[in-house]
Image (spheres, rainbow, N blue to C red):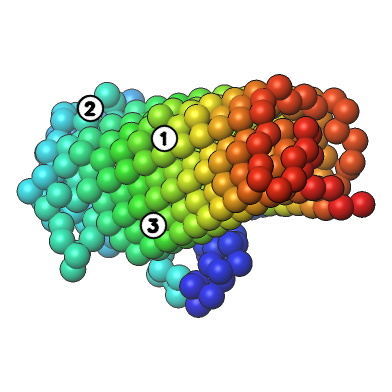
Amino acid sequence: MNISSRLDRGFAFVLLCALLTVLTVDFVSPTEGEAAARRVRRATVSPSQRSAATPRTFAAGTGTQRSPYVIRTAAQLSAFAASVNNGEAYAGKYVRLGADIDLKDVVWVPIGFYKEDGGTRPFRGFFDGAGFTIYGMGSGNDSRRPAGALFGALDGAAADNVSLQFVNVTGGVNVGGLVGFMTGSSLKNCRVSGTVTGQAAVGGIAGAALKGFMENCHFSGNVVGESGVGGLAGAVDHVAIRFCKTEGQVEGNVDVGGFVGGILNGIIAESVADRVTVHGERNVGGLAGNMIDGGRIERAAFNGQVIGNSFIGGVVGRMTDGIVTGCTVTGSVKGRAQAGGLAGELAGGEIRGSASAATVDGMANLGGVVGRMSGGMLRNNANSGTVIGGEGVGGLIGNFTGGDPDFSSNRSSGQAREQSKTGALVGIQTP
C-alpha cells in the first residue's frame, strides 16, 4: 500500500483504520463500542492458544479473574510479551502487575504485533496495571529495534489502570505509547508520559483504534509524526473517547490533532486538551485534525495553540461531516489560510452551541468560528476573540461559499480586522 500518496489527500487515517478490518470484530456504531469490546472478549480459548506460556512467565496466578497471572519483574513482562508473540493470545485470561517495573535498560519488544499481510498475533485478554507503574519503556531501544508500544496489538481485549512514565517510543505505522493498534478493545484509567515518534497513525496512547472505547485516559508529553498524529490517538474509527485529557505538544504534517489526528464515525466527549501546542501543515485542529463520515465531538475543550498552513481550527482542522456541539476554545489559532476559532473549514455537518475566545491570525479566509464554509450549518455559536488577517476576515466566517446561509443564531463580539475587506460577521460571501 502506498501510504504517502494517500496522505496528500488527508485521509491517511481512514486507510490505516481499514487495515484493522482483517481482525474478527462485527461492525458496530460508536455508541456500541463498549458492548462490542465486551462481546469479543468473551471469545473461547482454542487449544492452539494454550501452548506458548510457561510456568516461569508469571510470578503467581492461574489466569482467572479471582487468581490472575501476576507479573512483578521486567523479565516476567518480557516473557509475557514473548508468549503472546509466539501465539498465546490469552483470550478470556486475566493478567495483572504486582509491582513497579523499570524498563530503562531493557530492549523492549511489544506485546503482540500486527502484520498487514497476515500473521497478526494480538493480546485478547484482560490486563490490569493495578496502580503500579512501568518506567522508561523504549529507553533501551535504538533505531534498529524500535519499541513501538507496550502492546503491539489488542483484539477484543481490555487494558485498565496502566501507568507508563518516561516512555521513548519510536516506530513507523501504528505507533502509540500504550498500544500500536486496537480493535474491539477498551482502555480505562490509563496514563502515559514521555515521547512517541512515528510516521503514520501515531498517538500518545494509541496509534490506530477501531471499534472500542477509551475512558479516563491521560497523555502528557510529545507526539511527533507525519500523518494521522494525535495527542491521544492517531486514527480512530467507531471509537468512543470520554473523560480523557492531553497535555504537551503534537507535531505532524497532515491530519494532526491535540486529541486525534483523524476521526471517522467516532465520538470525543467530556474531554480536554489543556496547554497543548498542535503544529502541522494541513488539517490541523486543537482536538481533531480531520473529521468525516458521522464523527461527533461534544462537550470538549481546547486550551493552547494551533499552528499550521491551511485548514486550521481550534476544534477541528477540516470537517466534511458529523457534529461539533458544546465545545470551547481558548488560546490562539494561526494559519496562512482557512483558519477558524472552531473549524478551519466546514464542508459538511453541523457546529452548534460552541464558543471560541481564541485569537485567529493569518492571511486569508479567517473566521472567529469558521475560516471557510462550503457546506453544513452553524447554530448558536459565539466568538469573542480577535480575528486578524489580510483578506476574507469575519467575526464568524472568513469566506462563505456554500451551506446553510442562515447565521442569525450565531454571535460575534470580537474584532475582525483585515487589510482589504472587512466583514462584521462574514468576510467574503459568494451567493
Answer with left or right where residue 174 lies relative to residue 73.
Answer: right
User: Can you name the residue that lies furthest to the front here?
Assistant: 419
Task: Answer with mark 2 or mark 3, whichever residue precedes in sequence.
Answer: 2
Q: Is residue 7 above or below residue 90?
A: below
Expressed as whole percent of the image width and height from the top left, the position of residue 412 reads 73, 26
Answer with left or right where residue 265 lies relative to residue 203.
Answer: right
Closer to viewer: mark 1 or mark 2: 1
Expressed as whole percent of the image width and height from the top left, the position of residue 88 reads 32, 55
Amino acid residing under circle 2: Phe
Foreground: 312 or 232?
A: 312
Expressed as whole percent of the image width and height from the top left, the position of residue 285 reads 55, 44
The residue at which mark 3 appears reads as: 225
The residue at which mark 1 appears reads as: 276
Can residue 331 be seen in this snapshot? yes
SS for callout 3: loop
Disc 3 to disc 1, C-alpha distance: 16 Å
Foreground: 116 or 316?
A: 316
Residue pictured at 48% horizontal, 46% vertical: 307
The residue at which mark 2 appears reads as: 132
Packing grade of label 3 (10 A; few <14, some 14-19, many >=20) is many
How many marks can you see?
A: 3
SS for callout 1: strand
Residue pictured at 32% horizontal, 43% vertical: 222
Q: Is residue 300 above or below residue 250?
A: above
